[in-house]
Image: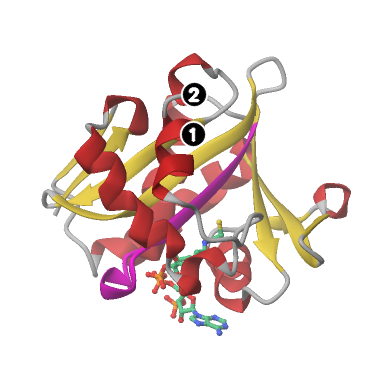
């Protein structure tokens, strides 16, 4: 499988619009900090701000050239080597979440050298809570708990040292499921 993470700042208008229905799907937005439906105008206006923002970065996820979702870094602090991340995958491609999370942690921690990665997990999002904690070795970090639109978000963090201990175990599990032929981030 070929994985291409295409930076939103390189999107054509058509590519930018293709991501919107995935973000607006009720199964996705219910777990976001902002659960409201985003209009096309709001979406395009927001994307046009990204080129000038250093504290956030968003990538569309293409698997074998097909758009399947999105992954992002926010709250990027290059001094502290800290960032929050998030992702979503469209309903027809569920099952790829763990491999995307693996490729994300490899890129953020091994390539970009972040020391702490934060995941903010909606209180009802049992799947992702389990994925982060049981599979990837995140720990609860109550200092990063937050609230949005009346919902609690658990702060879970993964440190670079913890990822070093976990990564081969995760990779061995995933290697049996997904052949990772090519990975490109831009
Ligand atoms: C998060 C998301 C990308 C995960 O993708 P996915 O393809 O479903 O993930 P996977 O199937 O690879 O892995 C999910 C894991 O959670 C487990 N799981 C599924 N439902 C679960 C539940 N209710 N409780 C506990 N674990 C659950 C699965 O069994 C699997 O673990 P396993 O491999 O050990 O069996 C996708 O569900 C999504 O886009 N959700 C909406 C947006 C979102 O929540 N984003 C995360 C916060 S930013």
- Looking at the image, is 182 positioned above or below residue 142? above
- Looking at the image, is 131 positioned above or below residue 156? below
Please give the count of numbered marks on the rendered protein.
2
Q: Position of residue 99 (x, y in %)?
A: 34, 58
The image quadrant where one finds the C terminus is: top left
| Residue positioned 53% across, 36% down in the render | 73
Q: Mark 1 points at which residue?
A: 46
| Residue positioned 26% across, 32% down in the render | 11
Whether 89 is among the magenta residues is yes
Query: Quick one: SS at disc 1?
Result: helix
Q: What stretch is highlighted in magenta?
A: 83-96
Q: How is the image coloured?
A: secondary structure
**Residue furthest out toward the right:** 143
Q: Where is residue 87 in the image (x, y as percent from the top left)?
A: 47, 53
Q: Mark 2 points at which residue?
A: 49
Q: Position of residue 150 (x, y in %)?
A: 82, 66
Q: How crowded is mark 1: few (under 14 residues within 10 Å), some or many (20 or more)?
A: few
Pointer 1 residue Cβ closer than 8 Å to ligand 1: no
Side of 51 where 132 appears, left or right = right
124 or 116, which lies in front?
Answer: 124
Quadrant in the rendering for residue 14: top left
| Residue positioned 54% across, 19% down in the render | 53
Look at the numbered discs 1 and 2 and tell me whether their residues touch, using CB distance below 8 Å: yes
């Amino acid at each position: 499988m070929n994985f291409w993470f295409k930076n939103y700042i390189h999107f054509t208008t058509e590519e930018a619009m293709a991501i919107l229905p995935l973000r607006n799907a009720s199964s996705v937005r219910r777990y976001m900090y902002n659960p409201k439906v985003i209009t096309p105008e709001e979406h395009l206006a927001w994307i046009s701000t990204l080129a000038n923002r250093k504290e956030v970065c968003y990538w569309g996820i293409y698997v074998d050239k097909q758009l399947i979702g999105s992954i992002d870094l926010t709250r990027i602090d290059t001094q502290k080597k800290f960032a929050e991340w998030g992702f979503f995958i469209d309903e027809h491609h569920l099952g790829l979440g763990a491999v995307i999370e693996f490729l994300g942690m490899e890129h953020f921690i091994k390539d970009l050298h972040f020391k702490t990665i934060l995941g903010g997990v909606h209180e009802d999002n049992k799947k992702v809570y389990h994925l982060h904690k049981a599979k990837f070795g995140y720990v609860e970090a109550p200092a990063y708990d937050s609230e949005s639109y009346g919902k609690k978000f658990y702060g879970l963090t993964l440190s670079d040292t913890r990822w070093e201990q976990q990564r081969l175990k995760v990779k061995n599990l995933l290697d049996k499921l997904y052949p990772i032929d090519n990975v490109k981030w831009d």
